[in-house]
Image: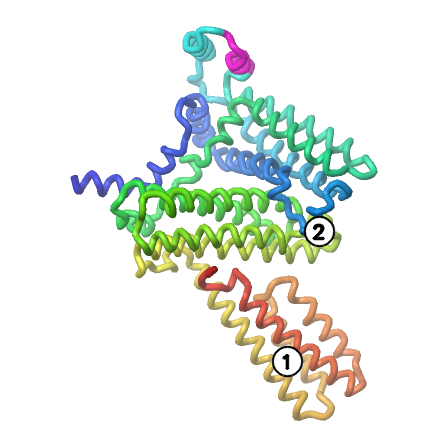
Amino acid sequence: MPGLKSQKARNSFLEALRAEIVAGNENLTSWIKHIHAQGAIDSLFWLETWLKGIRSFLNIEHLPLADSEKEDLLSRSFLSEIKIIRNAVQISETYACDVLNVGHAEEFELEKVIEDKIRKERTLDSHTSRFLAQITPVDSISQLLDSLNDMRISIDAYQRLPNPGFQLFLTLGRIYRQELRNCRYIDMLMSQRFRIQYDLIENKSLTEVLRGIKDEQVQRNVALAMLYIFRFLKYLRFVSNDLQHDRPLRHHLIIFSLLHEEMENLSNFLKARMLKGKDPSQDLKNAADLVAYSLKTESRKALSRELVFVSREMEPSNVYASIENSHGLLLNCCQSCILNLVKAVDPNFNEQSLFPKRVERIAMGDQIRQDLWSLRQWLIEISENETVPDTNRVIERLTLFKEKSLPLLMYRDWAGFESFMETLAISNNSNEIMTRMRKFINFIEDLIQEVSKRGIYQKNIKP
């Protein structure tokens, strides 16, 4: 018996995944295995992600809007959002083509499938006729491509309208959701929350933690929560990759809408399964409560604060800054949530074994604050001890900070430094120089406080 229990604990993530996969979809499962064997599983993952993301974005509850915009939806133009949807549809088409090119497994027997289906159904109802129109997953992908193409062409026409409004936005949402349901295997694919081929977590340190949970149901719930959060991290890596390579970012509002929806779903799951169900340990219950709160709070903060107006923002640097800050906020939230759950079971867990870069980021935040404070102190000494500050000396000190420390700050912070250096270089009046230095010192003090609040540099998330 001990050996059997150990084996069950060892496979907690696998068991949680299997329990989440809908039964009776052998054709879909075989096709996914074929996709995986052909090396196209990432294309299938991102196809599913963008399809879900568009669906979330077309739901007003997951759209980044200010309170004032929500109060005046009927008069607001949704042209910017419709353009983003158009871009996301085109991205989905690309991934769908990649998947379609792989085809289906050779052992798929058309006649046998039809015969088995008709025998089981006995009568040709609407479901059977739908089945006969889409016998294989490849058929569903083909139909999906037709639907996406139709939607993209329709959006191109809608964009020429003088003021595409809320009603059109809602109509697009209804049409899109119906088209997804009409694609039989796509509907099945999206009804499953996880996939063994790209969600299974193979981490020995986490496996050891799960072994420490004696109750099998609680163990499965914790494993399932981690599967959710690691999926969120995978979404965020896609955003991070585009941030690092300075690519267009506005379409990632789709991903953040998906994150908002799924983070709220996980928060509700934790409340239902771990806070109202069979009692786990008090430490684990407290951790689940904190995680549920953090997920909902941080995802709402990103959507309703950081990402508001990004869809219509014309300045690329402001778009970059908003996406960067939202990414950092949710990245830290997800990593902290995993660690909160893990440390509730094993307080001595070494977080560096799981998120080594997180430790580096925390150290980086400490270094940034220290560098900013040192610069502030140096400028105060200059302003107090020198009647006419040596601007060349000040610029030399700022240049050193710019080369060493400024790259560690977020892109949105750079403008303040660069503006001060530019104005200082052309200033000749001593009173003007002193005034600008005092303003810059205040800017540094505000920035120190801002850095201290940023999720990407925080060690823990607390309500």
Q: In the image shown, does 375 or 22 lie closer to the viewer?
A: 22
Label 1 SS: helix
Looking at the image, residue 130 sits to the left or right of residue 109; the answer is right
Total numbered circles: 2
Q: In the image shown, does 101 or 73 lie closer to the viewer?
A: 73
Q: According to the image, label 1 marks what residue?
A: 397
Q: Quadrant of residue 27?
A: top left
For marks 2 and 1, the one nearer the N-term is 2
Q: Nearer the viewer, mark 2 or mark 1?
A: 2
Residue 404, visible in the rendered structure: no
* Type of amino acid under label 2: Ser
Residue at 49% in and 42% down: 265
Residue at 64% in and 80% down: 397
Residue at 52% in and 49% down: 237
* Type of amino acid under label 1: Arg
Which secondary structure class fits the magenta region best? helix
Image quadrant holding the N terminus, namely top left
Few, some or many C-alpha atoms within 10 Å of disc 2 (few <14, some 14-19, many ≥20)? few
Q: Quadrant of residue 228?
A: top left
- Residue at mark 2 to residue at mark 1: CA–CA distance: 44 Å
Label 2 SS: helix
Q: Which mark is residue 68?
A: 2
Give coordinates of residue 382: x percent, y percent. 65, 88
* Disc 2 + disc 1, Cβ < 8 Å: no
Residue 143 lies in magenta, yes or no?
no
Looking at the image, residue 415 sits to the left or right of residue 213; the answer is right
For the magenta stretch, what is the residue range? Answer: 124-133
Give coordinates of residue 405: x percent, y percent. 58, 71
Q: Which mark is residue 20?
A: none
Residue 129 lies in magenta, yes or no?
yes
